[in-house]
Image: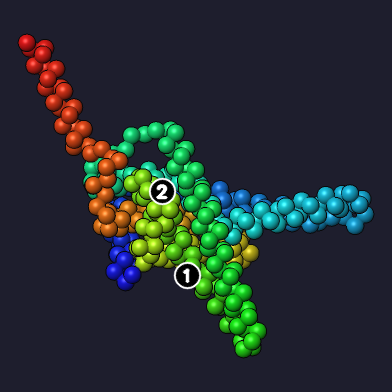
Amino acid sequence: MIRDLILGYKSYGNAIRFIGKHKLYYYFLLPIFLFVGIYYLGISLEEWKGQAAQVNSDAGFWIKIWNAIVYGFYTVLAYLVFKFMRYILIIALSPVLSVVSERVEHILTGNKYTFNFKQLIKDIKRTISLSIRNLIWEFGIVYSLYIVIAIFVWVFSIPSEIESYVDTTIAMLIGFYYYGFSFIDYLNERRRLTIPQSVVFVKKHRGFAFALGSVFTVLFHYSNRYFSTAKDDLSSNAFLFVVIFLSIIMSMIPIVTIVAATLGVHELVDLSENQHAYHSKEVDSTVKKVEELSTKQERG
């Protein structure tokens, strides 16, 4: 547990150096646009919710009912976007994260994977299925513990401030494991592990998953928290600058995390031995032999 925990945090430092050494900065571009889009969607939802809440007292009964439905819809949608943003991002970025992970693995081992559109769709479905599974498990455990804590607080009359702090801390700690799991599974998928096999692998290296998820979650949580408070305190121009700045910072988090996950898993299992990949050196050697054979035949 401790060894894997250290490996996880060390992998983040290695990931930053790896990105700089191999100039992988361009992979940050798409997440930046995605973050800006999600922030814009969140702001729009808040505005639409506010508009739906402004009902004229002279409006008819059915107009009031319709506005109440619209208000409820926007409220739920806004809650889902901000509550589950990390999982939404993991799903939305799954093609990019997969490409980045493959690129890092290729640099490390020379491994290559043939592109297959059906496999890409299958990988996206797997990411969605795993994210939903992790989401259910995470919130199931969190809310089960909430009930236990609530009973404990009621019995021993613990102040609400302490209860709130404990609730937040527990939720974040549990999230560390499941978010780290989501990034490790990109490697497990290429190793052709099933989801149950991936669960067993991550449980075995839970410290590594916890370390990956902790950095990702803490940076994401506090950046998003600052965003939520800044929009009420800043002018429109200053807020736009904050959105762009935070989008750049937050776009780095999932990219650096997937690089760290790839480097760490390579230390755990040696990805060069993956039988489901072909090695670029072997392919180059085969191509060279075919070219030499063709040249001999032409001369003959």
Residues 182 and 35: in front is 182
Furthest residue toward left: 300
> Crowding at label 2, few (<14), some or many (≥20) Cα neighbours within 10 Å?
few
Instruction: Tell me whether the residue at label 2 lies in contact with that at label 1, contact meaning CB atoms closer than 8 angstroms.
Output: no
Percent x, y of residue 198: 40, 54
Residue at the disc numbered 1 = 173
Give SS at disc 1: helix
Alpha carbon of mark 2 to alpha carbon of mark 1: how far?
26 Å
Q: Is residue 90 left or right of residue 154?
A: left
Residue at the disc numbered 2 = 194
Residues 79 and 27: in front is 79
Q: Is residue 92 left or right of residue 164?
A: left
- Quadrant of image for the N terminus: bottom left
| Residue 78 shows in the view | yes
Query: Which amino acid lies under the numbered mark 1 shown in the image of this protein?
Result: Leu
Q: Is residue 50 left or right of residue 160?
A: right
Q: Is residue 237 above or below residue 128?
A: below
Q: Is residue 261 above or below residue 229?
A: above
Residue at 19% x, 32% y: name it.
Answer: 284
Query: Which amino acid lies under the numbered mark 2 shown in the image of this protein?
Result: Thr
Residues 28 and 152: in front is 152
- Quadrant of image for the C terminus: top left
Residue at 30% x, 64% y: name it.
Answer: 7
Q: Is residue 278 above or below residue 168?
A: above
Residues 108 and 29: in front is 108
Give SS at disc 2: loop
